[in-house]
Image (tube, coloured by chain):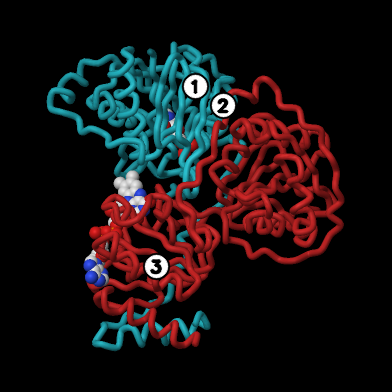
């Protein structure tokens, strides 16, 4: 079973994140860049599938040179090899353009199963599996809290409001995973050492046969016009409970015409 | 005036539309004349046509076939793409659910368009407002290619009545082989609740690790019920097994934007804020005066939730008489 896991590097969601005023794109320089936390669940699931069915796990990343750190982390968890697509021309690409690059890279690879995270924590759009399914003409099984593979068929429990949908599709397919699906392993010392020797293939747009003028900020299908910090909220009221906390709380709710 | 297609999201019982659909019809009016698109099993449109008309749908495209629900996302995207080709709308507006965003994405590729997700406002010139990075940044963005497609975040626009004709227009349903790839075998409801839906509620009361146990979540439920509110939970509360994952609020849970959000025993980590920061009014109860949630709160009580909350609940019930 050939498994490809899509891994993105993002600014740490626990640190302050900004847009770059120069061109309104996500500021990566100076940010604390980490592997998209949601992708660790996809990597873990890939390793679980490999343990059960055999095969190879390949990481695929589209992103700047610094994304090599995210790739190392994925390899140290246990993935076998990686493909890193990086090209200056991609700066500021929209989701539609990024999906074209990922799809072109995937078309040069051999895959039975593509795994990705349910969302990237910088954009939080959760659209990549749908975009790639559309481009590659393969089934989309998105939002999985459970995945089973049996006899060339993938079954997924898609997490929904108050329950799940049971989905089924033949392989090859793309599956995105929620953080309810598993508990990602920590890289072991051995894993970290081994990762240094694992092959990482770097590709440019030219290698994928993509015309650079079709990607990047200038030809993006949507554009950020401007941005601003949310207006700070007026200083709130904070009271200490001295036996009257409940009273004050209810008074406040009454003043807001809620009770 | 040009039409704006609005994909109707039916509520799970199929007897009505979700509030987000009425909000989408309202937002769509900035761009043109709303035309609702109802997809579902035969008989779906009859139950909702009137409501859609009340909220501004001049036309209601009716695409009914049991097949539309048998496969995931792709048939709806295909249907909308055909309508876009046939009717050349000014834009498409879709409620921002998981499915809605995926329909938008596939539709964008099929129609050669750009799309913007989770928008909170759409201006007459097509500029959309989005909130990025856990609500800390407000962004204005525009689609520059094709027919603009937007998904509208729930509770960010107030649904307004605007009676219109709601003229039914049947649409033939053809589900291609291509769109029959992912079969939906079953839709399972695990938690039935008499409380309002978390993402639609105008008041949400959430509990965190500070609630300390599953049993103790009855304190949160009690306050919620006294206010007619939905119940939410932080990830720490969910991970500790106090409350089911469905109710998690935050980056990897639900995004809520109610009139009032009450955070009880929640510290206010950035990933939690991501799901509630745009609430109109925020109230916090926490025993730690330094808890970051107080930076967001319009009103905060520093105290033990085990005494403050049950007492407040009693007083609210008493006031309501
Ligand atoms: C990738 C990723 C995604 C995440 N997604 C989410 C998400 O979607 N939603 C989410 O919520 N978190 C999310 N988190 C986790 C987040 O970082 C925090 O760990 C979590 O929000 C903390 O929950 P909490 O505030 O309930 O717990 P804590 O941080 O432990 O806070 C508990 C609070 O309760 C107070 N308290 C304790 N006892 C009492 C008492 N008797 N009376 C009053 N107050 C009391 C304490 O003072 C404290 O402030 C995510 C993290 C990561 C890495
Ligand atoms: N540039 C990228 N490179 C590799 N994988 C990506 C990239 N962008 C998105 N993904 C994958 O798609 C998932 C969903 O992303 P998104 O649709 O951006 O929320 C992520 O969790 C990643 O697994």
The chain displayed cyan equals A
Please give the letter of the chain rendered in red: B
Instruction: Specify the label residue B221 is tagged with.
Output: 3
Q: Chain of mark 3?
A: B
| Residue B188 in the image, given as x and y percentages of width and height | 50, 42
User: What residue sits right under mark 1 in the picture?
Assistant: A173
Q: Circle 2 sits in a helix, a strand or a loop, which is it?
A: loop
The local crowd at label 3, few if under 14, some if 14 to 19, many if 20 or more residues have their Cα within 10 Å, is many
Q: Work out how far the residue at label 1 is from the one at label 3, CA to CA, in angstroms.
A: 41 Å
Question: What residue is shown with label 2?
Answer: B182
Residue B153 image position (x, y, % from top left):
57, 54
Of residues B219 and A75, the one nearer the viewer is B219
* 2 and 1 marks in contact (CB < 8 Å): yes
The answer to whether residue B10 is visible is yes
Single out the mark in the foreground, 2 or 1.
2
Name the residue: 81% across, 63% down.
B163
| Residue B106, horizontal then vertical, whole percent | 62, 32
Which mark sits nearer the N-terminus, 3 or 2?
2
Report the chain holding disc 2.
Answer: B
B90 left or right, relative to A25: right
- Residue A182 falls left or right of residue A165: left
| Crowd class of label 2 (few under 14; some 14 to 19; many from 20; radius 10 Å) | many
Residue at 40% over, 37% down: A145
């Amino acid at each position: 079973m050939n498994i490809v896991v899509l891994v993105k590097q993002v600014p740490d969601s626990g640190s302050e994140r900004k847009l770059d005023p120069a061109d309104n794109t996500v500021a990566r320089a100076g940010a604390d860049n980490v592997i998209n936390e949601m992708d660790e669940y996809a990597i873990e699931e890939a390793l679980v599938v490999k343990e059960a069915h055999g095969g190879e796990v390949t990481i695929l990343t589209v992103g700047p040179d610094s994304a090599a750190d995210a790739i190392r982390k994925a390899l140290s968890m246990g993935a076998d090899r990686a493909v890193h697509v990086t090209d200056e021309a991609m700066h500021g690409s929209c989701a539609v353009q990024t999906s074209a690059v990922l799809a072109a890279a995937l078309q040069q690879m051999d895959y039975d199963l593509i795994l990705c995270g349910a969302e990237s924590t910088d954009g939080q759009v959760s659209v990549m599996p749908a975009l790639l399914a559309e481009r590659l003409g393969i089934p989309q099984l998105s939002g999985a809290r459970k995945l089973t593979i049996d006899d060339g068929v993938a079954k997924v429990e898609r997490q929904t409001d108050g329950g799940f949908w049971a989905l089924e599709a033949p392989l090859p397919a793309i599956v995105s995973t929620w953080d309810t699906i598993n508990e990602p392993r920590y890289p072991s010392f051995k894993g970290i050492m081994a990762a240094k020797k694992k092959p990482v293939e770097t590709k440019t747009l030219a290698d994928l046969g993509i015309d650079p003028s079709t990607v990047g900020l200038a030809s993006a299908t949507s554009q950020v016009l401007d941005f601003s910090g949310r207006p700070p909220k007026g200083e709130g009221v904070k009271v200490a409970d001295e036996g009257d906390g409940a009273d004050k709380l209810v008074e406040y709710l009454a003043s807001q015409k809620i009770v | 005036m040009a039409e704006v297609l609005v994909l109707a999201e039916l509520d799970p019982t199929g007897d009505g539309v979700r509030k987000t659909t009425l909000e989408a019809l309202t937002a769509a009016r900035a761009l043109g004349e709303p035309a609702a698109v109802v997809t579902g099993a035969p008989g779906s449109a009859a139950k909702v046509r009137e409501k859609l008309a009340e909220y501004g749908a001049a036309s209601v495209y009716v695409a009914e076939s049991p097949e539309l629900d048998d496969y995931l996302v792709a048939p709806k995207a295909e249907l909308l793409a055909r309508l876009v080709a046939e009717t050349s709308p000014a834009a498409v507006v879709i409620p921002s659910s998981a499915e809605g965003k995926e329909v938008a994405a596939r539709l964008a590729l099929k129609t050669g368009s750009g799309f913007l997700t989770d928008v909170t406002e759409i201006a007459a010139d097509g500029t959309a407002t989005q909130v990025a990075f856990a609500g800390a940044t407000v962004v204005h963005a525009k689609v520059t290619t094709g027919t603009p497609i937007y998904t509208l975040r729930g509770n960010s626009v107030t649904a307004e009545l605007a009676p219109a004709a709601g003229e039914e227009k049947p649409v033939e349903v053809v589900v291609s082989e291509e769109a029959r790839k992912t079969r939906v075998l079953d839709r399972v409801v695990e938690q039935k609740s008499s409380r309002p839906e978390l993402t639609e509620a105008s008041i949400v009361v959430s509990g965190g690790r500070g609630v300390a146990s599953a049993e103790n979540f009855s304190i949160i439920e009690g306050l919620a019920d006294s206010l007619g509110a939905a119940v939410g939970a932080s990830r720490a509360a969910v991970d500790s097994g106090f409350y089911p994952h469905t109710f998690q609020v935050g980056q990897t849970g639900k995004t809520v934007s109610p009139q009032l959000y009450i955070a009880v025993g929640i510290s206010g980590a950035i990933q939690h804020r991501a799901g509630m920061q745009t609430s109109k009014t925020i109230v916090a109860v926490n025993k730690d005066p330094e808890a970051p949630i107080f930076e967001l709160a319009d009103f905060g009580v520093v105290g033990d939730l085990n005494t403050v909350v049950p007492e407040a609940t009693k007083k609210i019930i008493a006031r309501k008489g």
